Image (cartoon, rainbow, N blue to C red):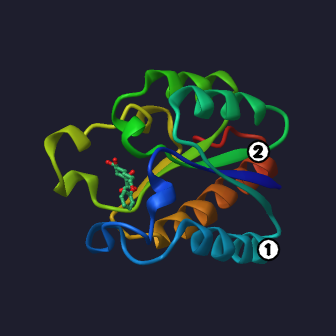
Amino acid sequence: MRIAIVNGPNLNLLGVREPSIYGTETLADVERRLHDVARELGASLEFVQRNGEGELVDYIHSLRGRVEGAVVNAGAYSHSSLAIRDALTGVGMPFVEVHITNVYAREPERRHSMLAPAAVGVVCGLGTLGYDFALRGLVAKLSSRAATGSPARV
Ligand code: CA2
């Protein structure tokens, strides 16, 4: 089973700036750990970070037929981008939305997600460990779908 881990704008700064908010782990550290988790689950990963909304839309389109699902931290676009939600639903990609921080405990503009209504699940506030949980949850959903023939979002 192949899964994409999709990261949006500014997440390349993880571990480099604002450690009090986002922690000290870099995105490369997260990628390394997730490859280990994927191996344990018998899955394989592709891991990407893009700063542009259009770049993210193009990348999501490229996933069609290549991966079975995605873990998505679209960064600030999570709160604004109908285009990214349309891309995910357009390619029929089951996905779990992740946020490192508890967006509900931050500024009001971060408390709404454009992606959540289309996600199979949402993880937030657990630091970068949230990616691990999202990956495990997504693989479990996709595996049970494969076993029962029912859609991943049920
Ligand atoms: O908590 C999350 O994962 C967010 O998706 C992170 C976004 C933010 O806009 C969302 O509201 C919540 C910001 C990503 C920027 O990451 C940085 C990391 C280190 C230093 C500066 C920014």
Q: Residue at x 68, y 74 (%)?
A: 32
Which mark identifies residue 39?
1
What's the residue type where badge 1 is placed?
Arg
Q: Nearer the viewer, residue 117 or 141?
A: 117
Dot 1 crowding, Cα within 10 Å, few <14, some 14–19, many 20+: few
Residue 113 drawn at (x, y percent): 34, 37
Q: Nearer the viewer, residue 146 or 68?
A: 68
Ligand number 1: quarter of image: bottom left
Residue 67 drawn at (x, y percent): 79, 44
Q: Nearer the viewer, residue 117 or 58?
A: 58
Vertical comparison of 76 with 4: above or below: above
Under tag 1, what secondary structure?
helix
Vertical comparison of 121 with 124: above or below: above
Dot 2 corresponds to which residue? Answer: 68
Q: Residue at x 42, y 27 (%)?
A: 81
Residue 37 drawn at (x, y percent): 69, 74
